[in-house]
Amino acid sequence: MDITKIVITGGPCAGKTTALSWIMNSFTERGYVVLFVPETATELINGGVAPWTCKSNADYQFCQMRLQLEKEKVFEQAARVMKKDKVLIVCDRGALDNKAYMDEATFEAVLRFVNANEVELRDNYDAVFHLVTAAKGAEEFYTLSNNKARTETVEEAAEMDDKFIAAWTGHPHLRVIDNSTDFTHKMKRLIAEIASFLGEPEPLEIERKFLIEYPDLNWLESLPNCEKVEIIQTYLKVDGREEIRVRQRGRNGHYIYYQTTKRQVTEYKRVEMERRITKDEYLNLLMNADTSLGQIRKDRYCLTYDNQYFEIDVYPFWSDRAILEIELRDISETVNFPEEIKIIKEVTDAPEYKNSYLAKHKPK
């Protein structure tokens, strides 16, 4: 049984309500049972529970986080007893959305209250799709009339949109859907992104890779839309052209584990299948490590810029360069780099910059 849990998030008046209808119609036709976890904040506020009715914002956030997580558990339990092979759980906002409404101290208190850490909460979802608010690029369509819980001005909505993106930055599968097209095509792009992630009809990964000058780490770490992730990657013994690896991913002692299988289709396209695994599964798979290849350890800086999601890999054996990657839905997409990032050359098709090659040939 294939159960996938995704988040649909975004700034105020981004089109989430309409998006949920599109998702239901599109993926029901593709054979999925589609389940929707309603937006928790709207439920609470419309029911009289709000930051301004509780004793403090922290008290409200305790309530919201607990309800959010309990609702998701109920939907996951229900999904496991469905009679279909494919179930798509769609969360109308997820556990990290309300981080945008908290200071750091309050957020840490909320984590303690639910006995969780940020990595677990963020990466508990298989993918996150952010719809950009109409207040950024489609201001004439911004309205408060279709949600009684919405109170933000255009300027506040744009600011909140940035905070939502920052809250989810660091997730391995974050996609940002902007207002560069009309609304109908915005919805079509969202559906295409979800379908591509689900592997409908095939899980193709289109990726471009660039060699860059060693980045200013202080600058990266100062950005609200950048998140550092520690990665340990191990390749397993395989036969044929497939590449199988396991990965430990997280920060500050909190980690999530993945197994990934890749097969090259063309220069830019690969079929990629990825699944979450438990720590015990990870440790067992390490027993089948390819000992001809060393482990790859790197710090990945996940950076959201101009509605694009960059991954900058900094390796301990390089002090003058790093690797920047970006996944695309279409190879013809234009990539807009931050001015602070200095491109040396594109290395998408250069085997000497693949992680599997570096694992074998990295400097001692």
Image: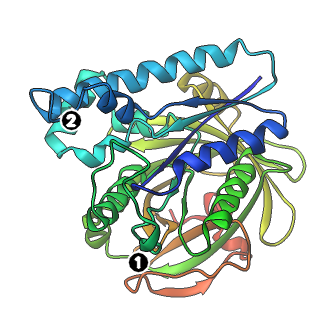
Work out whether mark 1 precedes mark 2 in sequence or the reverse, and give the earlier one.
2
Q: Position of residue 98 (x, y in %)?
A: 31, 41
The amino acid sitting under disc 2 is Glu
**Decide: marks 1, 2 in contact (CB < 8 A)?**
no
Q: Position of residue 177 (x, y in %)?
A: 56, 63
Query: Along the line of sight, which residue is nearer the eye, 22 or 267?
Result: 22
Marking on residue 214: 1
Distance of label 1 from label 2 (alpha carbons): 32 Å
- Closest to the camera, between mark 1 and mark 2, is 2
The amino acid sitting under disc 1 is Tyr
* Residue at the (24%, 22%) spot, across then down: 113
Query: Along the line of sight, which residue is nearer the eye, 100 or 225?
Result: 100
* Residue at the (24%, 25%) spot, across then down: 62
What colouring method underlies this structural image? rainbow
Quadrant position of residue 246: top right
Count of labels in the image: 2
- Residue 116 visible (yes or no): no
Farthest residue, direction top: 81
Q: Position of residue 351 (x, y in %)?
A: 73, 71
* Residue at the (73%, 57%) spot, across then down: 192
Q: Position of residue 55 (x, y in %)?
A: 9, 27
Query: Along the line of sight, which residue is nearer the eye, 120 or 9?
Result: 9
In-image side of 298 versus 3 (left or right): left
Q: Residues within 10 Å of mark 2 (few under 14, many from 20)?
A: some
* Circle 2 residue: 108
- Whether 302 is drawn above or below 102: the answer is below
- Whether 250 is drawn above or below 59: the answer is below
- Residue 34 visible (yes or no): yes
- For the N terminus, the image quarter is top right
